[in-house]
Amino acid sequence: MRTLILSLALACMAGIADLAAQTRLVTHRGYWDCEGSAENSIASLKKSKDVNAYGSELDVIITADGVPVVHHDSAIEGILIEEADYDQIKDRKLSNGETLPTLEDYLLAFKEIPDMKLVLEIKPHKRVVNEDRAVNAVLYMVERHQLEERVDYISFSMNICKELRRRAPYAPVAYLNGDVSPRDLKRLGMDMDYHYKVFDKNPSWIKESKDLGVKVNVWTVNDPAIMRSLVEQGVDFITTNAPLELNKILKR
């Protein structure tokens, strides 16, 4: 009887481990490719919950007068966000009719969505001082809303990643640029968040990362065949514009 109970317990633990190791879905700029939504909109954030996303990715840039706004491109309607005061851009509209959201707007909406994370990308800025200002403003706002446990950070800027590690050692931070090895990321205390083509050139990096305990996110994967290959390799996360396709694969 003890042997049977032990066998059942081990089987249960193995099943839990398999579930924990399953690739998880991150919606790229939220779930925007559906009716009523738009990239980096609050609608796309809310709709990410509908596709059972682990997290909703968003992009943040800071204005000249210190307001973090949610927008992918460095400019909106020809106005460079980093060099503009918030009043110059605050009434600009997204494609779904929403007003350009601030990070504050986003966090207030996010607090009402249980069991999901934000994957918050701080965009590279033209000036390092503005990158540091962006990190300060983002961390201050996340901490003020007591969301420290629900936000993962990513950036193409190594300066931003290092500043995040210094200022928020508790927070998961992943580097996006694709030019740092798993071993060096481990040394820096960062995870890996690379475009899928990086792994064509470095096919051993997924396994090396897993062996080192470095988490692997892959972006932006919309092709089901590539999704399947990455899931089979056991990547931790896939960021996609096609969450319904990825969910079909994960359910199999």
Image (cartoon, grey):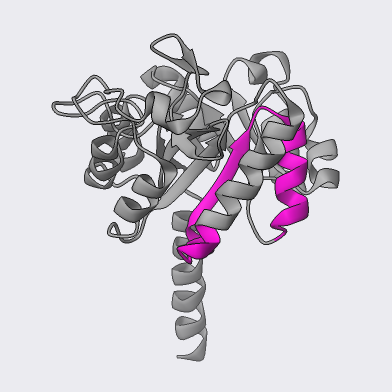
Residue 146 visible in the snapshot: yes
- Percent across and percent down for residue 153 are 58, 44
Which residues fall within the magenta stretch? Answer: 142-169
Residue 64 picture location, percent across and down = 58, 30
Quarter where residue 195 is shown? top right
Residue, x 45% and y 35% (percent of image)?
69
From what the image shows, is residue 145 above or below residue 51?
below
Relative to residue 182, is residue 12 depicted above or below?
Answer: below
Residue 32 location, x and y as percent? 27, 28
Quick one: 61 or 186, which is closer to the camera? 61
147 is higher (above) or lower (below) than 22? below
Residue appearing at x 41%, y 18% in the figure: 225
Q: How many marks?
A: 0
Residue 28, visible in the rendered structure: no
Work out which quarter of the rendered image holds the C terminus and state it. top left
Q: Is residue 172 left or right of residue 238?
A: right
Q: Is residue 213 left or right of residue 97?
A: right
Instruction: Single out the residue that lies furthest toward the bottom.
Output: 1
Q: Residue at x 58, y 56 (%)?
A: 140
Q: Is residue 52 magenta?
A: no
